[in-house]
Image (cartoon, grey):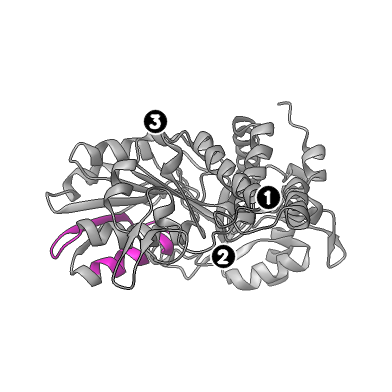
Amino acid sequence: MNFDIEKIRADFPILNQKIYGKDYIYFDNGATTQKPIQVINAVSEFYSSINSNIHRGVHLLSEKSTKAYEDVRAKVQKFINAEHEHEIIFTKGTTDSINLIAFSFGEKYVNKGDEIIVSAMEHHSNLVPWQMLCQRKNAKLKIIHFDKNGELETDKINDLITDRTKLLAVTHISNALGTINPVKKIVQLAHNKNVPVLIDGAQAIQHTIVDVQEIDCDFYVFSGHKIYAETGIGVLYGKEKFLNEIPPYQGGGDMVDHVTLEKSTYLDLPFKFEAGTSNYVGAVSLGIAIDYINEIGLNKIAEYETELLNYATQKMQAIEGLTIFGNAKNKASVISFLLKNIHHYDAGMIIDKMGIAVRTGSHCAQPVMTYFDITGTIRASFAFYNTKEEIDRFIEAILKVKQMFD
């Protein structure tokens, strides 16, 4: 395929360094992605020439800053194909977005004895807020389980839904297993019984085209730092009908219409959910990152990352004593694995000394580890700036670890 990897890698200055005297290899993209120079320069330029608080001032820089912020809202709307611009709410990240819905949706719709459905493969960010909601409201949490390959038992969803089910929340792509869930099918199953659906897109937004109208989800959430933007900025997409009905999550400046000492009224969407000074510079970085991704093309990115995944999987399956966790037919560029009789932390430390960054542990998905009766895995997660040559070095590092422990 026509994919100028050298040109792309040149855009990421952090890759052009040595760690422990070796060329740096970054395989921890599931935790956060690196930032292209276009994003870095845009942030620096914004602080150097435009920086001013948004929505607050009549002076020129405040107007420029506000326009830059709101332009990104329109850009995100187009990127995920939301119907309305005001359905895009800026948050601190995926976790903040989910907590917003868990509180506001929960306050409006969830009562004692009601039910929330989540999957057993969720990141803690899409599990703990729903547990807290159920504890607060004396509601019940129900679970969609997965099989040994890491595929959700979607055929059980109909049996889980009752007339007390208020919401289903599921990850688009598992951060621990790499499974790409059939979210459109899941949404259809839930909607057949009038149950709204929230999708955690933290691991999907950078790997695949997301069309929220085609999926027909009621909420979709993601983080800027997963898609090559700054940390501290995230997005909550919600259908207008729900966002209008649920109460604000936080109160304060920028979300109020009229305030007296006795009571306050709130602004319309999207400002109703954006209390205080938003991370407007982070939003600008998200807009530049989206431009960057669009210029390359998400289809090309997905195709290239699939090549990397298949190449690495084939190489790793040939290593004796190596077990991959998560073998779904439809996977993103994540490989979680263990080496027989070698603790994941020990292996990760040695791999790090070889100049390769991987993540070890439970990946904020402890129920997944419990299912497989393990404490954690080594996770290699690839991005479009990685190469097959880096994977070859990674394989050499794994073999070196095995040799050391043997």
Mark 3 or mark 2: name the one nearer the start of the chain: 3
The quarter in which the N terminus is drawn is top right
**Residue 323's spot in the image, x, y percent?**
53, 56
- For disc 3, the neighbor class at 10 Å (few under 14, some 14 to 19, many from 20) is few
**Residue 184's spot in the image, x, y percent?**
36, 36
Comparing marks 3 and 1, which lies closer to the viewer? Answer: 1
Horizontal side of 234 relative to 355 (left or right) equals left
Q: Element under label 2?
A: loop
Q: Element under label 3?
A: helix
Q: Residue at the far top: name it.
A: 1
For label 2, the residue is: 340
Horizontal side of 123 relative to 119 (left or right) equals right
Q: Is residue 228 visible?
A: no
Against 306, is 160 above or below?
below
- For the residues bearing labels 2 and 1, Cβ distance under 8 angstroms: no
Q: Give the residue displayed 65% in from the left and 61% down from the top.
A: 358
Residue type beneath disc 1:
Leu
Q: Which residues are magenta?
A: 110-134
- For the residues bearing labels 3 and 1, Cβ distance under 8 angstroms: no
Q: Nearer the viewer, residue 151 or 167?
A: 167
Residue type beneath disc 3:
Glu
For label 1, the residue is: 60
**Distance from the alpha carbon under mark 3 to that under mark 1:** 40 Å
Task: Using the image, tell me which numbered label, if any, was put on residue 325.
Answer: none
**Distance from the alpha carbon under mark 3 to that under mark 2:** 43 Å
Horizontal side of 87 relative to 164 (left or right) equals right
**Residue 265's spot in the image, x, y percent?**
32, 59
